Image: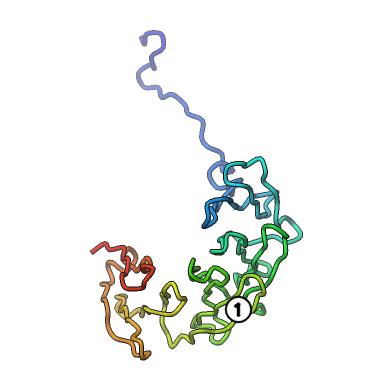
Amino acid sequence: MANKGEIAPGHRRRTALLTRKVAFADPLRSHLRLSDDGTRIAWLQNEAGMLSVMVAEALDTASARRLTGGPVRPVSPALFWAADGRHVVVFRDSAGDENYQAFSIDVDTGAEVALTPDGGTRTLFNRTSRRIPSDILFSVNHRNRQSFDLVRANVTTGRRMTVFENPGFSRLHADAGLAVRFGERVRQDGSIEVLKRQGDGEWVPFLEIPAEDSLATHIDGLSADGEVVFLLDSR
């Protein structure tokens, strides 16, 4: 016989299971981002299944206000600050087709500007630069659905231009001047060849990543002067 408070032999204490909602539901708040100057925060808030963009002073979350989103202008689950600390960048697609278009939102005025083309093209964020805080670099497959060119867009005016036509790289890395410095190619055996772009535009071998390390080894950025490469390395 078990003593008081003990579990009798052959019996197991029943533990309540987590509900599917707790395990799989979207979080109430996600994608928390701090502006480059450290004064504001932005995040995505789930409101009845629709994502809204919220912004607040970094030390006063009670000042939070909605910029856009909800059932009228829902956004996709991605959010970035421009380096100017005044604009956030959001993405939208059409009926879940994952052909994302980028938009900038002025957090002071609420003005919204399209930064990349719509109409069946997909946009991916590439990088910002404190050296050029007004512009953002995107990867866009508007010219060739299989290759993502680099498009530079002004977050205030929406003016954009293609700065690099991709000849077939799977990934491109730019420096603080928003100029392409490295490109990655996936070989048939799954290994990755990293090439460096010279000043004359010629590409030369820089690094080889074996297939078994391809998921955990990659370039994670460049120094401000572009002379040092930061690498996550699992080899």
- In front: 64, or 185? 64
Q: Residue furthest left?
A: 235
Question: In the drawing, does residue 213 fall left or right of residue 118?
Answer: left
Compared to 125, does 37 lie above or below? above
Compared to 139, does 81 lie above or below? above
Please identify the quarter of the rendering in which residue 109 is found. Answer: bottom right
Residue 98 pos. (x, y %): 60, 70
Please identify the quarter of the rendering in which residue 191 is found. Answer: bottom left
Question: In the drawing, does residue 15 fall left or right of residue 65?
Answer: left
Residue named by callout 1: 121
* Amino acid identity at mark 1: Thr
Residue 78 in view of the camera: no
Number of disc labels: 1
Name the image quarter holding the C terminus. Answer: bottom left
Q: Residue furthest right?
A: 72
Query: Which residue: 42% across, 75% down?
Result: 174
Question: In the drawing, does residue 155 fall left or right of residue 217?
Answer: right
Name the image quarter holding the N terminus. Answer: top left
**How many neighbours does mark 1 have within 10 angstroms: few (below 14), some (14-19), or many (20 or more)?**
some
Query: Which residue: 35% across, 87% down?
Result: 199
- In front: 217, or 56? 56
Residue 136 pos. (x, y %): 54, 71
Residue 165 in view of the camera: yes
Query: Which residue: 64% across, 51% down?
Result: 55
- At mark 1, the secondary structure is loop
Compared to 108, does 56 lie above or below? above
Residue 70 pos. (x, y %): 72, 55
Residue 220 pos. (x, y %): 37, 65
- In front: 16, or 211? 211
Please identify the quarter of the rendering in which residue 62 is found. Answer: top right
Indicate the colouring scheme.
Answer: rainbow
Compared to 127, does 23 lie above or below? above
